[in-house]
Image: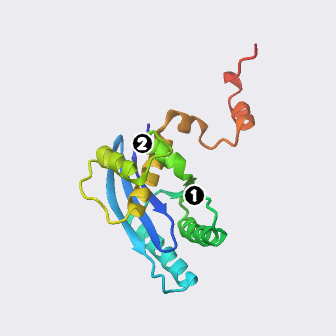
Amino acid sequence: MQQREHTILGIDPGTLVMGYAVIKVSGSKVTMQTMDVLKLASKKDIYARLEMIHTKVCELITLYKPETFAIEAPFFGKNVQSMLKLGRAQGVAIAAAMQFSLTVKEYPPKKVKQSITGNGNADKEQVWKMLQTILKLDEKPQFFDATDALAVALCHHYQLSSPIGAATKGLKGWEDFISKNPGRIKIK
């Protein structure tokens, strides 16, 4: 279990609305520092919106000084153009985090929902209700993109604090685990 203070920036990428949230972890206590959205004007071209995403992520990193950056992976839909635009938004946010040498972790939507609600198919309202309970939050945000970002940050915290996550941290697969843990292998 983590005992030191740790700050995580969570992002729900989007080309019209980008959700973001910052949580602070002190021992086993998790508190939300901020949760909101960046509205990206649909009238602006995609490159201007990408610049706005980069600028906002850099501002959040400068203000809250997170050690890690967690982002939701794009949901693979049928519209290729939408996926391309979403991938660009995600890439720009990741590039901003890498510019500040943050550890970056990407989570698929089902993994995020599973870690928060126990159900990988939970809807946005169910995820928000669990976040309210876990973090003792009252206000309901205007956009679920913000709560999705909060869920991504909390999911990342759970992965970092999991005994399984800690045991496999930095490993590149079973071969790597075996080579680094020869005394734990039992041959029958």
Which residue in the protein does label 1 denote?
Answer: 73
**Looking at the image, can residue 30 be seen?**
no
The residue pinned by badge 2 equals: 117
**In the image as oriented, which residue stretches furthest toward the left?**
138
Q: In this view, does 162 lie to the left or right of 28?
A: right
- Residue 173 at x, y = what percent? 70, 39
Q: Is residue 62 visible?
A: yes
Whole-percent x and y of residue 121?
50, 46
Q: Quadrant of the N terminus?
A: top left
Q: Give above or below for 26 relative to 100.
A: above
Give 83 or 50, whichever is nearer the viewer. Answer: 83
Please, what secondary structure does the residue beneath circle 1 have? loop
Residue 110 drawn above or below residue 182: below
Residue at screen point 53% across, 65% down: 97
**In front here: 150 or 5?**
150
- Give the label, 1 or 2, closer to the camera: 2
> Residue 187 at x, y = what percent?
75, 16
Vertical relation: 3 (above or below) 18: above
